[in-house]
Amino acid sequence: MFEFISLNTFWTILLIAHGLLAVATLGALTHQAMAVTAPARQPATSFGFVTRFRNVRGAGYATAICVLWVATFILGAWIYTKYRIAIRIPLERTGYFKTLGFFELKEHAAALGLWMLPAYWYFWQNAKNPAYDAARKWITVLLAAMCWFAFLTGHVLNNVRGFG
Amino acid sequence: MTVATEPRAQANSAHVVPLASSAAFGAFAIVFAIAGPIVYVVSELGGVPLFTYHPGTGRIDFGFAAARPNEGPAMYWYGWLATTLIGASLVGLIATLLPRNVTAKIPLFLIWLLPLLVLPILAYALMPFWTR
């Protein structure tokens, strides 16, 4: 494969795929979190953007979000090996320690989100069970917050120093 | 032959419970989600990754291993993930053996509260990054 593309191009493609998967996860989780925290009271036929945005069936997103989170996580974990050598060491030499600290914290947040996924999926598959309402709501909100934090931190780090 | 196998097929399908409505899977998922952050933070702070990966050489050592001279850094995050995956899965599997009236009493708010409590601890463990 490296006869056709350079090593840097390969890692850049992986990083872009990781970023695109993260965007999809972010969009789906934000819709779902909005729907569960501020559900629209009427069908959104002639209402504004915000009402339409939160007027989605949250349960229909759960499986896709689990798949997207895991896929994003696996790609990110793969890229992390390259990051440790090609990105982190030069950033340490130039003194970007707080940026690196936030990136390490993002890895922890992504892992903590991973452990919640089976319960998150189970609660959304049983969305009609009122016993799970509060847990389902706050897990979804927390996952959305973690996803935003991870996305923004990764984006900033890529701005500071990306592949290539 | 078709007539003879139909009741057996129906009997088999009657025993198949979808994952989403399985009480055992529910108990596993809830306990796995509660145990996950605890095992993860213990693994990180206690320095007990299942393995250490050395990205410079591709070497994998069992358990914790310090970075070797002239071989680049050592990575423990993968080892923490593996420790947590195994540890939390074992606790989750044990939970499936408990009576339903016991698992029904597990406070569900722990699933979202524990990660929130653990994040500042993990941030504190990253202190060298914040103070340099």
Image (cartoon, rainbow, N blue to C red):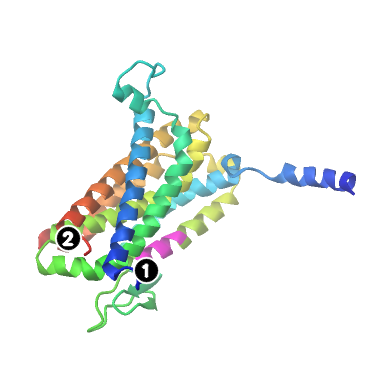
Where residue A140 appears, as percent x and y from the top left, is: 38, 38
- The magenta segment: B78-85
Q: Quadrant of residue B60?
A: bottom left
Q: Which mark is residue A161?
A: 2
Q: Are marks 2 and 1 on the same chain?
A: no
- The residue sitting at 33% across, 42% down in the picture is A26
Q: Which chain is indicated by disc 1? A: B
- The residue sitting at 47% across, 34% down in the picture is A59
Considering the whole magenta stretch, tell me its main secondary structure.
helix
Where residue B68 appears, as percent x and y from the top left, is: 26, 82
| Circle 2 SS class | loop
| Circle 1 SS class | loop
On whether residue A78 falls in the magenta region, the answer is: no
Which residue is situated farthest in the front direction here? A4
Q: Nearer the viewer, residue A119 or A41?
A: A41
Q: Which residue is mark 1?
A: B49
- The residue sitting at 26% across, 65% down in the picture is A83
Q: Which chain is indicated by disc 2? A: A
